[in-house]
Image (cartoon, rainbow, N blue to C red):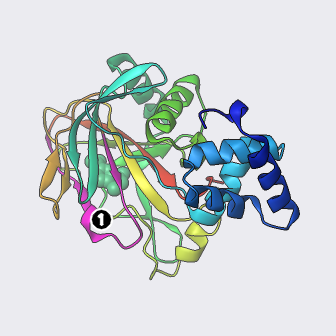
Amino acid sequence: MNSVTSHSNSLRDWIQSTARAGHDIDQIVQMMLRAGYQPRQARQLVAKILNRPAVAIDVAMDVRNGRRSRHPEAPSQLAEGRRVDVTMSVECPTIRVLEGLMDAQECDELIELARPRLDRSRTVNSKGDDQLDEARTSQGMFFQVGEAPLIQRVEQRIAALLDMPVEYGEGLQVLHYLPGQQYEPHYDWFDPTHHGFKTLTAKSGQRVATVLIYLNTPEDGGGTHFPNARVTVTARRGTAVYFAYQSGDKDSLHAGLPVTAGEKWIATKWLRELPFV
Ligand code: PD2
Ligand code: ZN
């Protein structure tokens, strides 16, 4: 079966009678997957035959299953009409270097949007509260999702690249580092043993991936280091590093290395298991 329009009458009858028998959409799609249908095809067919919006089905299934991003693959991918080159891939942990995610003008524009709103960076402590953090000496700020046309464009690009709806992303964060400033080794997933974990993950689930975009090229230093993978990504304007992880995944340990000359600007997009609210 090649398309949604060419489904057979017997498949239509089967989906309708299975739904009438009390099976929910998720169960019907799972049965179709076991019968050999592809996930997207099964969802589209069920949506069409049961007259339900495909988006609603996607969300209903994600809520049960937890959404995972699709890792961008080399050599390149088209994202909203823009060619992004995958210039390095590591499998354990999952890391991709994405060259050309933003162009120079977009990087400069994002820096200027963020500059007047910078504040000393904070992290979330074990009680779920914001705190100043000696491990993170940069200045930063958060944009709202879709706050400005440029932000919408970048968010749509990331969503297309990872096959993840924009709704699963937290607001874009911009960080500014001066010489000597760094972000010490840490994980981006929320620690399930911390007191604040339930609050942090109650509505949108765990973080599943990070896209960290370099908005300028520091004169020296400022790369992103993955000590357990022994990988360091060089900070270069318009390039991004994508990495995916699961809760408790120790391989994804990473650090923002000290800037040793010049300055460093980055934008970070964290992606969640569920729509971010
Ligand atoms: O600034 C960085 O390179 C960096 C490194 C690791 C930023 C983050 N993590 C982060 O914002 O989570
Ligand atoms: Zn991080």
Which residue of the protein is positioned furthest toward the right in this rendering? 20
| 95 sits to left or right of 144 | left
Q: Quadrant of residue 244?
A: bottom left
Return the x and y of residue 275 as percentages of the image width and height.
63, 53
Return the x and y of residue 143 as percentages of the image width and height.
54, 40
Residue drawn at the location 54% of the way across and 56% of the way down: 67
Residue 184 in view in this figure: no
As helix, strand or loop, the secondary structure at mark 1 comes to strand
Q: Is mark 1 within 8 Å of ligand 2?
A: yes
Question: Relative to the observer, which residue lies in front, 222 or 130?
Answer: 222
Residue drawn at the location 18% of the way across and 51% of the way down: 257
Residue labelled with disc 1 = 186
Q: Is residue 109 above or below residue 196?
A: above
Where the C terminus falls, by quadrant? bottom right
Question: Relative to the observer, which residue lies in front, 189 or 266?
Answer: 189
Q: Is residue 211 above or below residue 122?
A: above
Q: Is residue 219 magenta?
A: no
Residue 128 in view in this figure: yes
Q: Is residue 42 above or below residue 199?
A: above
Give the extent of the magenta segment: 241-260
